[in-house]
């Protein structure tokens, strides 16, 4: 089973750690694409190229921030990206933060569940394509819809590079796709894989009305992953995965299979 998660926008920058070593990351077939994206991001964010021309540097900073979708108070994130080659790294499961990751809470998983997480979880990344929980990465800022000078849309880079890697990572198992739409665009499973693809949507029901609410969606997905890892089961089909979620206490509705897979709606009524 492969459980695909979205990254978090915010990340925890480690105070100490070894510098980034792309060759040491999982899925080494992605190294050339990782190098290209990393180089393009650093080139964009290296805005202090000529200390003698502060006006030019200020313009470069403004351009980099605009390209990355950053506000005036977030210039520190441009500097963060400029130092990615030498920045301290830590395990990916310590770098990614936010509602989903708080609910999953890697650090407090049982030893057996941590081993399952290492083997079964993949995290979509605009910078690295996909990382595993134990991969050593730095904190960075790059959204899934970003387009970098000289490179183009990062989603386009990963659509090409991820296909063989993800197919190999999935093997004969079930894909549980919890990515948001932005990151789902990095790799879409082929119709041949559809019988083994489960996508999960979380709906908040209130006064008879259902809708997707970001906080409920992220928190519930984190809790689902945690519970599945602790349970230890490895369902082979979307229906079997839905049965597992019901066993674990969720209200699940299964849609008809399509060439994209089977959508599971998890209905929550309170956080």
Image: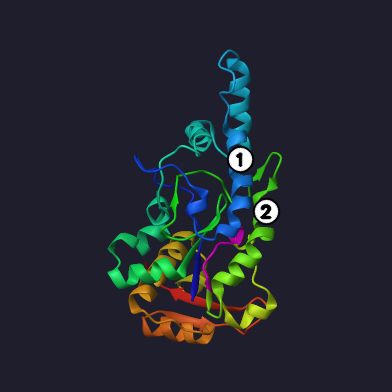
Dot 1, crowdedness within 10 Å: few (<14), some or many (≥20)? some
Residue at (46% x, 83% y) in the render:
235
Q: 200 or 47: nearer the eye?
A: 47
Q: CA distance from mark 1 to mark 2?
A: 13 Å
Q: Determine whether 182 is above or below 252 in the image.
A: above
Which mark identifies residue 157? 2
Can I make out residue 68 in this image?
Answer: no
Q: Residue at x 69, y 39 (%)?
A: 149
Instruction: State the image coordinates of residue 133 (x, y, percent, origin top left).
Output: 42, 60
In-image side of 93 versus 171 (left or right): left
Above or below: residue 39 compared with residue 94: above
Instruction: Name the secondary structure under disc 2.
Output: helix
For the residues labelled 1 and 2, say whether their Cβ atoms are less than 8 Å apart.
no
- Looking at the picture, tell me which residue is in the foreground, 218 or 110: 110
Q: Which mark is residue 160?
A: none
The segment highlighted magenta reads 176-183
Side of 149 where 116 appears, left or right: left
Percent position (x, y) of residue 203? Answer: 49, 71
> Is residue 193 among the parts visible in the rendering?
yes
Q: Is residue 259 magenta?
A: no
Circle 1 — which element? helix
Q: Which residue is mark 1?
A: 39
| Left or right for 217, reference 62 | left
Is residue 180 found inside the magenta-colored segment of the image? yes
């Amino acid at each position: 089973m492969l459980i695909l998660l979205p990254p978090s926008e915010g990340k925890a920058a480690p105070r100490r750690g070894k510098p980034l070593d792309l060759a040491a990351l999982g899925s080494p077939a992605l190294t050339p694409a990782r190098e290209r994206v990393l180089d393009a991001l650093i080139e964009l964010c290296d805005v202090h190229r000529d200390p003698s021309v502060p006006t030019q540097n200020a313009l470069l900073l403004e351009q980099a921030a605009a390209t990355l979708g950053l506000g005036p108070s977030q210039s520190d994130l441009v500097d963060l990206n400029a130092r990615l080659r030498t920045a301290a790294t830590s395990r990916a499961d310590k770098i990614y933060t936010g509602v989903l990751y708080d609910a999953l809470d890697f650090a407090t998983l049982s030893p057996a569940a941590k081993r399952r997480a290492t083997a079964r979880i993949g995290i979509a990344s605009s910078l690295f394509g996909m990382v595993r929980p134990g991969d050593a990465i730095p904190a960075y800022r790059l959204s899934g819809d970003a387009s970098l000078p000289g490179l183009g849309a990062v989603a386009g880079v990963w659509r090409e590079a991820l296909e063989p890697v993800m197919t190999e990572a999935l093997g004969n198992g079930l894909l549980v796709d919890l990515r948001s739409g932005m990151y789902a665009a990095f790799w879409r499973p082929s119709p041949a894989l559809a019988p083994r693809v489960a996508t999960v949507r979380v709906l908040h029901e209130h006064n008879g009305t259902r809708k997707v609410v970001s906080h409920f969606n992220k928190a519930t997905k984190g809790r689902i992953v945690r519970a599945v890892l602790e349970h230890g089961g490895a369902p082979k089909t979307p229906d079997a995965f839905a049965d597992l979620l019901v066993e674990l206490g969720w209200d699940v509705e299964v849609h008809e299979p399509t060439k994209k897979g089977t959508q599971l709606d998890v209905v929550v009524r309170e956080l």
